[in-house]
Amino acid sequence: MIKVSVMYSNKPGVRFDHDYYRTKHLPLIKSRMGTALKYYTIDKGLADRDGRPPGAYVAMCHLLCDSVDDFQSSFGPHAQEIDGDIRNFTDVTPIIQISEVVVENSAKDETEARHRIPIDHSSSPQRPNQVIR
Amino acid sequence: MIKVSVMYSNKPGVRFDHDYYRTKHLPLIKSRMGTALKYYTIDKGLADRDGRPPGAYVAMCHLLCDSVDDFQSSFGPHAQEIDGDIRNFTDVTPIIQISEVVVENSAKDETEARHRIPIDHSSSPQRPNQVIR
């Protein structure tokens, strides 16, 4: 499983409409990606480690897919439309990070069990070899 | 629910022992935080949006708790020990981000149902007013 993290950096005077993000933008992504998107999460920045709000990122979302290929083939054809919606809720250009999900949820037995078997991540087949868009 | 994201930035020649991180460091955090830690996730950086490995962050973990207070009271007393373990797997000082979990898992009905009721995030009671350590 892979996770695409979309991270909106904080900056002075940042504009970010959290309500639009939750009720319009993520549902748009979900509708375009279809079943390739297993699920998503949304975070709203509260503070950095010293308590300064909202922290390094004003908001983040994480898109979970089975593979990088699944993400690219489902998101790619709609990237222009989805990216075009960003101006409707923020003036920040997000950082995109694609990660391998090593532990999805430590409280789920099946996840922990899977990772009790040592695995060699250096030979992961999920390393992408093409650009997203 | 809140999420503490611990993010290790990539840099040239970065040192990061993903196996130690998964098998030693996160279990250490779990054992010290006890039941205040609902669960954690681990991500291993694969690429940025243009396919360049490993992306902005070489690794991340996310610690899920019911509240900022729960995190501070369970992590704080062990912060020195936990931070002291970081040198055992990396030479990167992580960025810490505390976020409100707006959507935990879009595929879970109960999460979506909770957020169908409009809520005013500007008056969130979970805004921290003290430093973590």
Image: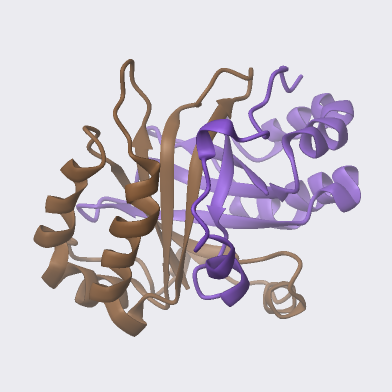
Chain colours: A purple, B brown
Q: Where is residue A7 drawn, in percent x and y?
A: 53, 38
Relative height, residue A76 to residue A107 (above, below):
above
Asked where in the image residue B71 lies, by quadrant, the reply is: bottom left
Relative height, residue A42 to residue A16 (above, below):
below
Q: Where is residue A90 drawn, in percent x and y?
A: 60, 36
Total number of numbered labels?
A: 0
Residue drawn at (35%, 66%), measured in percent from left and top? Answer: B127
Examine the rendering and report whether any part of residue A54 can be seen: no
Viewer-proximal residue among A5 and B92: B92
Q: Is residue B41 left or right of residue A111?
A: left
Q: Where is residue B34 drawn, in percent x and y?
A: 30, 81
Residue drawn at (33%, 15%), measured in percent from left and top? Answer: B12
Q: Where is residue B85 drawn, in percent x and y?
A: 17, 52
Examine the rendering and report whether any part of residue A98 can be seen: yes
Residue drawn at (60%, 53%), measured in percent from left and top? Answer: A18
Q: Is residue B104 left or right of residue A49?
A: right
Viewer-proximal residue among A59 and B96: B96
The quadrant of the rendering that contains the C terminus of chain A is top right
Viewer-proximal residue among A91 and B59: B59
**Residue furthest to the front:** A117
Asked where in the image residue B67 lies, by quadrant, the reply is: bottom left
Q: In this view, does A33 lie to the left or right of B107?
A: right
Q: In this view, does A100 lie to the left or right of B11?
A: right
